[in-house]
Amino acid sequence: MARYTDASCRLCRREGEKLYLKGERCTTNKCSISRRAYAPGQHGQNKKKMSEYGIQLREKQKARRYYGVLESQFRKYFDMAVNKKGITGENLLQILELRLDNVVYRMGLGMSRPESRQLVRHGHFTVNGKKVNIPSYLVKVGDVIAVNEKSRSSIKIKDNSEVAAGKPSPQWIDYDADNLTCKVAALPSREDIDLPLKESLIVELYSK
């Protein structure tokens, strides 16, 4: 399966803000945005006025990179959002939030979405008692996500769960830190999604 394998920090620099792709590193002075707050490449420091299309494109790219989704899959999610009742932009963000790797990240068992994606791929989680190793799996209201019994002794998951213990979980999930389980209590609303995205610009881009 195709996936991005280049340096993650280039993505943050290209968007001009932290995408938190490397977890705790992004909160330290090692973060590339702190050291080189300009776009990568030979002409990265040259500031150009963006067109309306450019602004819309950058917003779409930023959303893709936050969630770690390639273009073809992102377009598929947009088409799903169009066919759902409600506001298309909010529907799109809701679908992205319901990805299994994102739910693991929201539980706090992955320090970043890329790390959460890797944990899912390695079979550390179950959905309704069945092992699921597909990061793009879309959970539904009522689904129960849990750490696989064999993975509960994992040092990585133990360490991450200790860090997550003092952090609040989103209102749309019920996280049980003692049992390392999470129930999807409701669909995430726009207020639950704390990312600085202007989803209306993405809708405008794809509507051209």
Image (cartoon, rainbow, N blue to C red):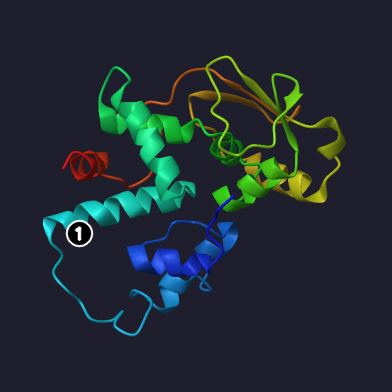
Does 208 sit left or right of 134 as displayed?
A: left
Residue 73 appears left or right of 14: right
Q: Residue 70 versus residue 33: which sits nearer the camera?
A: 70
Examine the rendering and report whether any part of residue 91 can be seen: no
Secondary structure type for disc 1: helix
Can residue 67 be seen by looking at this rendering?
A: yes
Residue 39 pos. (x, y %):
34, 74
Q: Quadrant of the C terminus?
A: top left
Up-down: is 71 above or below 145? below
Above/below status of 91 relative to 208: above
- The residue shown at (25%, 54%) is 57
- Looking at this view, name the residue that lies furthest to the bottom: 42
Q: Give x and y (percent) for residue 179.
A: 76, 27
Residue kind at label 1, given as amino acid type? Gly
Residue 144, given in percent of the width and then of the height, sits at 65, 20
Residue at left 51%, top 73%? Answer: 29
Q: Is residue 202 left or right of residue 157?
A: left
Residue 80: which quarter of the image? top left
- The residue where tag 1 is placed is 54
**Quarter of the figure with residue 108:** top right
Q: Nearer the viewer, residue 205 or 48?
A: 205
